Image (spheres, rainbow, N blue to C red):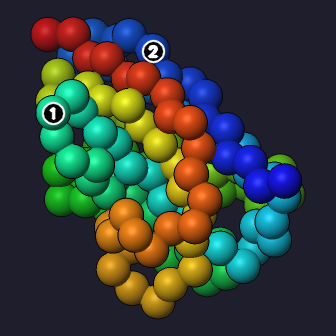
């Protein structure tokens, strides 16, 4: 059974930090790229960051560049999203997802598996 389980969300003040984790199981981790997405109330789900397990390529949305860092620990089939200098506009449910693709990492439809999400709330 494929599973993606996010953890690490919570409530933090603006300027603070959180580290999200995505633990994957049930598929060949090294064959997939793992992406982080977020969805705020009333908004579409948007791509935040992505890491390709096979070649280590990293992708970031412009809105988080320089503040968020994605990394993976392949031995534990886990991907992390370190979020620093958080802003109220980062408030959303954050999801991790797994997919196989060559580009356009930010497209929701390219991902095969999704986690249940973890809430991140940044207070001003």
Left or right side of 19 for 6: right
Q: Label for residue 87? A: none
Circle 1 SS class: loop
Q: Position of residue 94 (x, y in %)?
A: 42, 37
Residue 91 lies in quadrant: top left
The answer to whether residue 110 is left or right of residue 24 is: left
Q: Quadrant of the C terminus?
A: top left
Evaluate whether residue 21 shows in this view: no
Determine contact: label 2, label 1, CB under 8 Å: no
- Residue 2 seen from this side: yes
Q: Is residue 112 above or below residue 37?
A: below
Residue at point 59%, 44% (across, down): 115
For residue 42, the mark is: 1
Residue 82 in the image: state x and y as whole percent.
47, 39
* Front residue of this view, candidates 117 and 66: 117
Q: Nearer the viewer, mark 2 or mark 1?
A: 1
Residue at image mark 2: 10
In this rendering, the answer to whether 34 lies above or below 31 is: above
Q: Which residue reaches farthest bottom? A: 102
Q: Quadrant of residue 58?
A: bottom left
Q: How many marks?
A: 2
- At 45% from the left edge and 15% from the top edge, which residue is drawn? 10
Q: Residue at x 39, y 85 (%)?
A: 103
Q: Position of residue 74 (x, y in %)?
A: 77, 61
- Horizontal side of residue 62 vs 86, given as left or right: left
- Helix, strand or loop under label 2: strand
- Mark 2 crowdedness (10 Å alpha carbons): few <14, some 14-19, many ≥20: some
| Disc 2 from disc 1: Cα separation | 20 Å
Q: Is residue 15 above or below residue 62?
A: above
Mark earlier in primary sequence (2, 1):
2
């Amino acid at each position: 059974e494929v599973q993606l389980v996010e953890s690490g969300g919570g409530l933090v003040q603006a300027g603070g930090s959180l580290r999200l984790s995505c633990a994957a199981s049930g598929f060949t981790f090294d064959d997939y790229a793992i992406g982080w997405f977020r969805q705020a109330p009333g908004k579409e789900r948007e791509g935040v960051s992505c890491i390709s397990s096979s070649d280590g390529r990293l992708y970031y949305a412009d809105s988080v560049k320089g503040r968020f860092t994605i990394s993976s620990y392949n031995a534990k089939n886990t991907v992390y999203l370190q979020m620093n200098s958080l802003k109220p506009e980062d408030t959303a449910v954050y999801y991790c997802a797994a997919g196989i693709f060559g580009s356009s990492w930010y497209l929701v439809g390219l991902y095969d598996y999704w986690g249940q999400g973890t809430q991140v709330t940044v207070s001003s």
